[in-house]
Amino acid sequence: MLDFQKMSEKELKDIIENAEKALRNLHVNRRKDVMAQMKELAASINVSVEIVETDKKSLVRKGNPVPVKYCHPDDAEKTWTGRGVMPTWLRALVDAGHDRSEFLIQPVINA
């Protein structure tokens, strides 16, 4: 058994790095085994399969940005889309007696 208390920081980091590498290899090998099993099962019923691996990042849903609806009267960097929790700057102004419609950004209309 390893006595971690007696190891140096470098020895501990090396162990962690090697363990993480071994775990990644284990996951890769398991994935290959599962894909081979899937192909074998498909072939057993005369079906062919094509396994297409995608980048996980490409699966992230990317919506359109929500336009800003409200703006702080003195600091244009402080904005709010009107969604989610009201920001503290707007909450403070509303609590001070202002109506939040005073801080609506007016759309530009081209004539």
Image (spheres, helix red, strand yellow):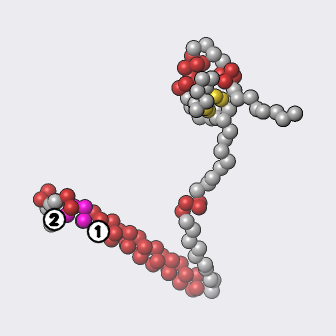
Secondary element under disc 2, as helix, strand or loop, is loop
Q: Three-letter amino acid code at disc 1? A: Asn
Mark 1 nearby-residue class (10 Å; few <14, some 14–19, many ≥20): few
Whether residue 95 is situated above or below residue 27 in the rendered picture: above
* Circle 1 residue: 18
In this rendering, the count of numbered labels is 2
Q: Is residue 86 visible?
A: no
* Circle 2 residue: 2
Q: Residue at x 61, y 26 (%)?
A: 72
Quarter of the figure with residue 57: bottom right
Whether residue 101 is situated above or below residue 80 in the rendered picture: above
Part of the protein shown in magenta: 11-15
| Residue 70 marker | none
Secondary element under disc 1, as helix, strand or loop, is helix
Instruction: Return the x and y of residue 75 as percentages of the image width and height.
Output: 58, 27
Look at the image and tell me in which quarter the C terminus lies.
Answer: top right
Instruction: Return the x and y of residue 92 as percentages of the image width and height.
Output: 55, 20
Q: Three-letter amino acid code at disc 2? A: Leu
Q: Residue at x 61, y 13 (%)?
A: 97
Quarter of the figure with residue 84: top right
Quarter of the figure with residue 71: top right
Q: Residue furthest left?
A: 6
